Image: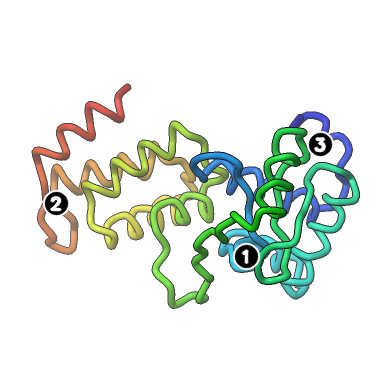
């Protein structure tokens, strides 16, 4: 499917919306899965990507969704607040979304609106903003690291990797491991050595 989409889609807004919608759907549990309009227009990553062209982000997202709907990659149904719910255009998802809409059994997914630069990003947002799109293996490693290191360390390690133009999770993890082992230049000590040992073993797998 991705090969076909990359060949056919020539509009960046449509490609961004399609890929981000697929990613958001895969973060959800249970079935059927859908993403609300509210989630998409408040998604921090999508907003940042949509505004990169210098245009207003929300209209650009709306345009990308309309193009994806016209292509038939995704389908939409009215939600509880008269805004759309989106799913992939498969027979199973169409039937499930129709049934949930007709029966009024859908629950709008919880959303976290982007509050702008003042918001502290979590480790997943830092990865996507500075390295690239997540995959399941990297997501597990990020979850593990988030349990071990302070948020300030994680942010500083990403910042250091970007400054050195070494945009990879392995490089960020190496910085964190070095700080844990040797301490930081600002005098902050290492922390959680027992958990750290477990993380090193996980990271080597």
CB contact under 8 Å: marks 1 and 3: no
Q: From the viewer's perspective, is residue 116 above or below residue 174?
A: below
Query: What residue sits 49% from the left and 75% below the top?
Result: 117
Quadrant containing the N terminus in the rendered view: top right
- Distance in Å between CA atoms under marks 1 and 3: 22 Å
Residue at 14% x, 39% y: name it.
Answer: 195
> Helix, strand or loop at disc 2?
loop
Q: Name the residue under label 2.
A: 183
Q: Which of marks 1 and 2 is nearer the N terminus?
A: 1
* Mark 3 crowdedness (10 Å alpha carbons): few <14, some 14-19, many ≥20: some
N-terminal of the pair, mark 2 or mark 3, is 3
Residue 197 is drawn in which quadrant? top left
Viewer-proximal residue among 57 and 167: 57
Give the residue at mark 3: 5
Report the residue at 81% width, 36% height from top.
5
Q: Residue furthest top?
A: 205
**Residue 171 screen position, x and y as percent:** 38, 40
Give the foreground label among 2 and 3: 3
Is label 1 in a helix, a strand or a loop? helix
Q: How far apart are marks 2 and 3 (CA)?
A: 47 Å
**Residue 187 location, quadrant:** bottom left
Can you identify the residue that label 1 sits on?
48
């Amino acid at each position: 499917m991705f090969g076909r989409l990359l060949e056919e889609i020539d509009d960046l807004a449509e490609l961004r919306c399609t890929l981000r919608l697929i990613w958001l759907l895969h973060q959800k549990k249970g079935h059927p899965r859908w993403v609300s309009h509210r989630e998409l227009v408040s998604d921090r990553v999508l907003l940042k990507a949509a505004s990169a062209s210098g245009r207003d982000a929300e209209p650009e997202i709306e345009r990308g969704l309309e193009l994806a709907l016209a292509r038939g990659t995704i389908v939409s149904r009215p939600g509880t607040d008269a805004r759309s719910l989106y799913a992939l255009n498969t027979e199973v998802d169409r039937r499930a979304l129709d049934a949930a809409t007709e029966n009024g059994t859908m629950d709008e997914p919880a959303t976290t609106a982007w509050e702008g630069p003042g918001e502290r990003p979590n480790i997943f947002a830092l990865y996507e903003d500075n390295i690239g799109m997540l995959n399941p293996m990297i997501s597990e490693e990020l979850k593990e690291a988030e349990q071990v290191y302070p948020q300030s360390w994680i942010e500083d390690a990403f910042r250091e990797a970007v400054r050195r133009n070494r945009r990879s999770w392995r490089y960020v993890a190496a910085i964190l491991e070095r700080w844990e082992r040797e301490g930081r230049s600002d005098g902050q000590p290492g922390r959680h050595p027992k958990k750290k040992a477990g993380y090193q073993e996980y990271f080597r797998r």
